[in-house]
Image (spheres, helix red, strand yellow):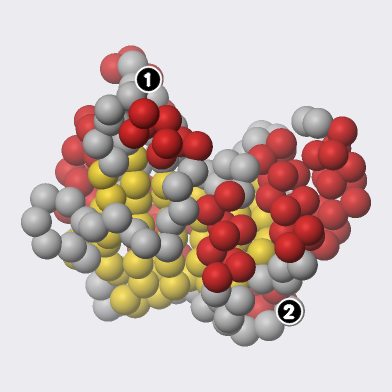
Amino acid sequence: MSDGQEAAWETLSDTYMFPVERDAAATSVHPDQRLNPAEFFGREAELVVEIGSGQGHAIIHAATQAPERNFLAVEVFRAGLARTMLDANTAGLSNVRVIEANAPEVLEHLLPEGSVSEIWVFFSDPWHKKRHAKRRLVRPGFGSLVARALKDGGTLRLATDWQDYADQMVEVLDAEPDFERGFEGEWAERFDGRILTAFEKKGLRVGRDIRDLTYVRKAR
């Protein structure tokens, strides 16, 4: 981390970061720990969770545009979380919080069932080499974890610039009984709440198509 990020980590973690109880690994979540969103944010509000928030550009922009909503960034890379906290503090945002943890464990254990209005997965690692594809976030079983955390009618938004990963996302989520498509045609329209990040710019620069997908949590 840069000196500024190191300082942000030291001085802002108590304000913005949820203190995760670990299991075996450094970024694991103890299966008995739970997060109370209203207590953590200090208010009742719709909750949006971004998985793999990176440097936090998307979530900081969204939190600025929608102060009535709460935004939770889930990431495993400390430099990105430090940057997110620094930018949130600079912007004076009180509706942003962060978690350093593996996203599947956050979805499975930490978040209360049916507590989230939207979950975002924007440009997660495509693991584009065939032998690494099993490491992708969106694979069989992921949909059930998301469905647990989302409220009825809640939205899962995804975007990627890797065509084969987009195809895999569709295959996985179309097969999930708890979800239905929130779009018509082959792909969803670009989500207008997503700013143009470095990942998307890079994909466009090398001529890749950006694929958006939207799925809606069916009623329980």
Outermost residue on the left side: it is 185
Residue 31 showing in the rendered view = no
Front in this rendered view, residue 18 or 1? 1
Around disc 2, counting alpha carbons within 10 Å, would you say few (fewer than 14), some (14 to 19), or many (20 or more)?
A: few
Q: Residue at x 35, y 67 (%)?
A: 155
Q: Is residue 28 above or below residue 149?
A: above
Give the residue number, with chain letter if any, for mark 1: 132
Residue 48 on image: x %, y %: 51, 66
Label 2: which secondary element: loop
Image quadrant where one finds the N terminus: top right
Q: Residue at x 87, y 33 (%)?
A: 3
Give the residue number, with chain letter if any, for mark 2: 42
Q: Measure the C-alpha gap from mark 2 to mark 1.
A: 41 Å
Q: Amino acid at mark 2?
A: Gly
Residue 169 on image: x %, y %: 26, 43
Q: Is residue 193 left or right of residue 43?
A: left
Q: Residue at x 73, y 63 (%)?
A: 91
Q: Amino acid at mark 1?
A: His
Q: Is residue 109 left or right of residue 41?
A: left
Residue 215 on image: x %, y %: 26, 61
Outermost residue on the front side: it is 205
Around disc 1, counting alpha carbons within 10 Å, would you say few (fewer than 14), some (14 to 19), or many (20 or more)?
A: few
Q: Quadrant of residue 209?
A: top left
Residue 10 showing in the rendered view = yes
Label 1: which secondary element: helix
The answer to whether the residue labelled 2 contacts the one labelled 1, judged by CB atoms less than 8 Å apart, is no
Residue 153 on image: x %, y %: 31, 76
Sequence-earlier tag: 2 or 1: 2
Image quadrant where one finds the C terminus: bottom left
